[in-house]
Amino acid sequence: MRRIEGKAIIELRVNGEARTVAVRPSDLLLDVLRNQLGLTGAKPGCKNGDCGACTVLMDGWPVKSCLVLAVEAEGHELLTVEGLEGKSPVQAAFVGHGAFQCGYCTPGFVMVCHAMLTHHPGAEELVMEEWLQSNLCRCTSYSEIRDAVRAVANAGKRE
Amino acid sequence: MIARNFAYLQPDTKEQAAAFYQEFAEPFYYGGGSEIITMCRAGDIAPDAVIDLKRIPEANVLRLEGDALVIGGCVPLRAIGDSGLFPLLKLVCGRIADHTNQCRITLGGNLCGTIQYRETALALLLADALVVLFGPGGARAVSIHEAFDERMRLLHGEFVLQARIPAQALFLPYVHVKKTAGEKIDYPLVSLSALACGDGVRVALSGLLPYPFRSRAMEDALSNRSESRERRVQNAIQCLPAMPMADYQGSAEYRQFVLRQTLAAMMEVLNL
Ligand SMILES: Cc1cc2nc3c(=O)[nH]c(=O)nc-3n(C[C@H](O)[C@H](O)[C@H](O)COP(=O)(O)OP(=O)(O)OC[C@H]3O[C@@H](n4cnc5c(N)ncnc54)[C@H](O)[C@@H]3O)c2cc1C
Ligand code: FES
Ligand code: FES
């Protein structure tokens, strides 16, 4: 049983490290990642669950961190775009296919694609469509994003 | 940022959850949190405590038990879909919000939320499911038809612990069609679920009226094979319990038009 009232010190496992933060129960994971841990990859967009710019992974599944309380994340493994350290094939494919313009939506897209390709290495079109519909891009780089993800998925199919 | 703070409680048992509920003046049970967080941020609600149900073992069950599929109230829609145990519910869950939100939105949250669509109720109504509710008075298993009348009718301090779906309903031929006004991911203009059962059909709808419903009168009209398909669809529409909603997504007439097309397509697919 856990009970948190007022402000509390909690430990978050982020990108493989244990990080200690002081939070109120009503603090959002997105704000804590950005303002307390300096992990500014996850972006505030709509803060309403619609745009996906704030997406991070919790135990390997994508979540919109604007709709998660920081206290809820205790005991779970969090992965932000910083934790990929530029080594995810998705990141290379986004660069290779020019899959962004302003780049604001990119960390969210990268995290969703990374999770999808971890769960479905050779993801078919239908799976891609289903997962990627969670994110919006105002600059409409959609076709380049699709090309980038498809390239990584096709490589996954060959393996 | 949420302006007003609250206490966060994470019980390990259903009994602890019900006890916490009684300690506070304005407590909210907390599933995936997507609606609670949005409404707190907007200042629409101001809980003094949220009781996170996700550590309660019975609320996380997703398995066949005897002659029923048991789904815990905290199981996220994504897991229900991935399990493939109830193909109709899989389709319904797959069209609620988007995939990332489906990783958080829970069955209990969708059934009990303020957002009127509550589309998972469609599959539960058609399958004649039981819901197991838990509160200060203990557990009670009630038919979904008793528990869900336009919305969940819970006693003070009760929460949805589980839904139990009779195994015989799981693999009946089914249809789920969700029509939106524009984008694929949106609230429904008309969301229709159907199960073919014997010679007849069961239908439930969301988006059409300000609440989800199953209509026996519509089912009788649609199952009456002595009439042509066109006539049966017409008769079913005449049995609607109220005028369709009119809002920014579509007028009442447009919703009725969409319903007509959707019912006709359903008849075709189920070969009725
Ligand atoms: C971007 C987005 C799109 C959406 N699109 C759709 C859609 O297309 N169709 C649709 O039907 N819905 C849609 N919704 C609505 C969504 O299903 C509801 O808001 C739902 O309440 C969220 O579930 P949750 O588990 O996150 O609930 P929470 O935010 O945790 O809770 C919501 C409400 O339910 C109560 N509650 C939660 N769990 C339980 C329980 N086990 N027992 C009793 N009460 C409980 C809470 O006290 C609260 O009042 C959408 C939501 C979002 C954010
Ligand atoms: S900022 Fe979280 S979904 Fe838009
Ligand atoms: S690249 Fe600008 S929002 Fe997507």
Image: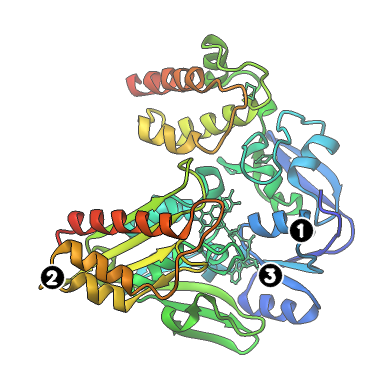
Identify the residue at horizontal 28%, vertical 70% (top origin): B236
Please give the residue where the numbered disc 1 appears in the rendered image. B40
**In the rendered image, the vertical position of residue B121 relative to residue A154, given as above or below:** below
**In the rendered image, the vertical position of residue B17 relative to residue B109, given as above or below:** below
Q: CA distance from mark 3 to mark 1?
A: 21 Å
The quadrant of the rendering that contains the N terminus of chain A is bottom right
Please give the residue where the numbered disc 2 appears in the rendered image. B227
Q: Is residue A44 left or right of residue A99?
A: right
Asked whether mark 3 and ligand 1 are closer than 8 Å, the reply comes as no
> Closer to the camera, B43 or B49?
B43
Q: Is residue B94 left or right of residue B152?
A: left
Q: Quadrant of ligand 2?
A: top right
Please give the residue where the numbered disc 3 appears in the rendered image. B11
Note whether residue B65 is visible: no
Q: Amino acid at mark 2?
A: Glu
Identify the residue at horizontal 51%, vertical 23% (top origin): A142
Q: Amino acid at mark 1?
A: Cys
Q: CA distance from mark 3 to mark 2?
A: 56 Å
Q: CA distance from mark 2 to mark 1?
A: 52 Å
Dot 3 falls on a residue whose secondary structure is loop
> Closer to the camera, B240 or B77?
B240
